[in-house]
Amino acid sequence: MNRIKKGLNTICTHVGELKDEQFKGAVSPLYMSSSYAFEDVSIKRYPRYFNTPNQEALSIKIAALEHAEAALIFGSGMAAISTALMAFLKAGDHIVLQQTLYGGTYSLVTETFEKFGISYSFTKGWEIDDFEAQLKENTKAIYIETPSNPLLTITDLTAIAKLCNNRGVVSIIDNTFASPVNQNPIDFGIDVVIHSATKYMGGHSDICAGAVAASEEHIERIFDLAKNFGGSLSDYTVWLLERSIKTMGLRVKAQNQNAQRMAEYLEQHEAINKVYYPGLQSHPNHTLAKAQMHGFGGMMSFELKEYLDAKKFRKHLKLIKSSMSLAGVESTVISPAETSHALMSAKIRAEQGIKDGLIRFSVGIEEPEDLISDLEQALSKVQFK
């Protein structure tokens, strides 16, 4: 087992780094070659096999961060999600998925699984009874996302892991919103952990990547499919991702603190109808989040009062950007109904509680007073009907 017992920031900075034996540089050298020797070598390296020097080294770092035995790096979060899911499912199988999910995952399942003869069920909610009620004899996996996108629902990791172990199915989680800084699902018995590494691992809104961490046995199974799907990541982006992860612990902890301030501010504001953030005591799963998370994260969502125009509010923001992605050092907002969950029908969004006026807020590392000032001036301009 490859569990590396070091502190978070030490892992972020040092584990998996490549040594510059020639010039003794302080950072990992970048190996750009796409062609390596095949004779008289112990490992036949090829980018699509996820084993170039930079790919291999970064996988060790990510495995250590998630307390896993092994990991793989992918070209995007969706490449990681689709490959991991298909590695454990075949025609005739069934999967249970949490109701509240990233829209891209929802679209992947609803638009493609039937073509491969894979059936699926979405839960009615996110309590353990909701999952157990959907299990069938041919269920092979349970897929969860906690905190979820965009409503920040919290699912009980220990209960899901126990249910899966009892029924002999694989437990899979999208851990993107939490990041390895705030949550380590493998410690609670979850089998496979997925990240859109574009988000908190990258953290600067300038790369696209995905990651999967699990046992060596599960990673080998995922790799057997991944090498044929071709979702590997270029070594230059791998190098950039390793550089970004070095500061992930510092960035995410700062974002945790800022998000807590923003959530408390917004919850008390007369223009806000509801705030979704697990760090608030008003969150229905605050106690559970406290038990399984090291920090509550930099993500939240909120709803303006019904008579206020959410689009006008977003346009009045000056410091906080309207932007498609999340988890960068800069604060951003989006409308899930228009972006991440636009491929869902209005009916499905309504069933999940995703209102058209919902605003997802990715809190950055700016000074909290500056963020509050920006929110305040934008809210003041849409106060009246």
Image (spheres, rainbow, N blue to C red):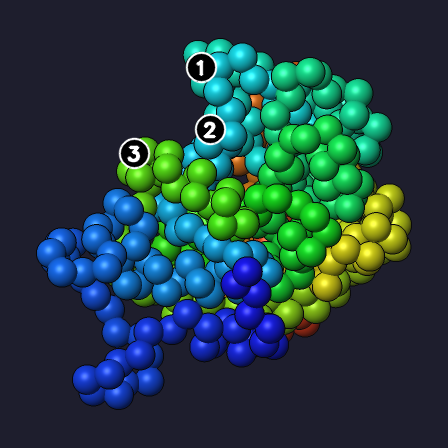
Using the image, determine if residue 75 lies above or below residue 249. Answer: above
Could you tell which of marks 2 and 3 lies nearer the N-terminus?
Answer: 2
Frontmost residue, 354 versus 383: 354
Dot label at residue 60? none
At x 39%, y 62%, the residue is: 58
Is residue 184 toward the left or the right of residue 11 in the image? Answer: right
Residue type beneath disc 1: Phe
Q: Secondary structure at mark 3?
A: helix
Label whose residue precedes the other's in the sequence (1 or 3):
1
What is the number of the mark on residue 116? 1
- Residue plotted at (72% across, 20% down): 135
In the image, residue 125 above or below residue 254: above
Q: Which mark is residue 86?
A: 2
Element class at badge 2: helix
Task: Say what secondary structure mark 1 lies in.
Answer: helix
Mark 3 residue type = Asn
Task: Give the residue at mark 3.
Answer: 228
Confirm or deny contact between disc 2 and disc 1 (CB under 8 A): yes
